[in-house]
Amino acid sequence: MCTLALEIGRAVLVIRVTWRATNGQLDRNDLIRTRVTMSSDEAWRTGHRAALPPTLISGVITALWCAVCIVVPALRTPASVIVVSVILVGSALLSIPVAHGAVRRAALEGRAGHEDAQTDAPASGRGR
């Protein structure tokens, strides 16, 4: 039962850290990093913003499953702990490509918007 309670704590911690990074309350750091999200503060926030939904879903599923296992003694097995650990770690690993994709899309949109602004700018002083 203690292991299940610890797993609930881990789920809450993962959600909290991702939430804080999304809202700018957790700066880029050497503990939680990938090359793409560490490239800038905006990339850091964009990546975590994209990773937040799968993190929330897996964290809530993990916490709820652990709570059910605590209440129902028949479910308090090593397999239950393994299942919730796989869910939480697996979703964290799966959120990495989600975050990277969001950062890359934002960078491409930023470049496209910058190029559009340059082509739309009037050519002042020419032809006079």
Image (tube, grey):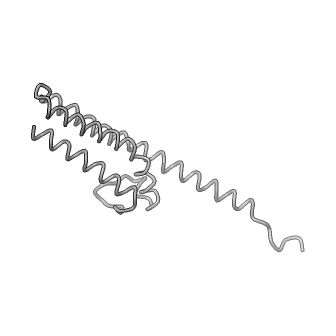
Image side of residue 68 versus residue 118, left or right:
left
Which residue is rendered at x = 40% and y = 55% of the image? 22
Which residue is rendered at x = 12% and y = 40% of the image? 3
Q: Specify the quadrant that holds the C terminus.
A: bottom right
**50 lies above or below 127:** above
Which residue is rendered at x = 89% and y = 70% of the image? 127
**65 lies above or below 128:** above
Q: Where residue 60 sits: x, y (%)?
A: 29, 40
Q: Where residue 27 sits: x, y (%)?
A: 35, 63
Image side of residue 84 versus residue 22, left or right:
left
Q: Specify the quadrant that holds the N terminus.
A: top left
Q: For the view shown, which residue lies furthest in the right direction?
A: 128
Looking at the image, which is closer to me, 9 or 78? 9
Give the tally of numbered discs. Answer: 0
Q: Where residue 50 sits: x, y (%)?
A: 44, 47
Which residue is rendered at x = 10% and y = 28% of the image? 73
**68 lies above or below 26:** above
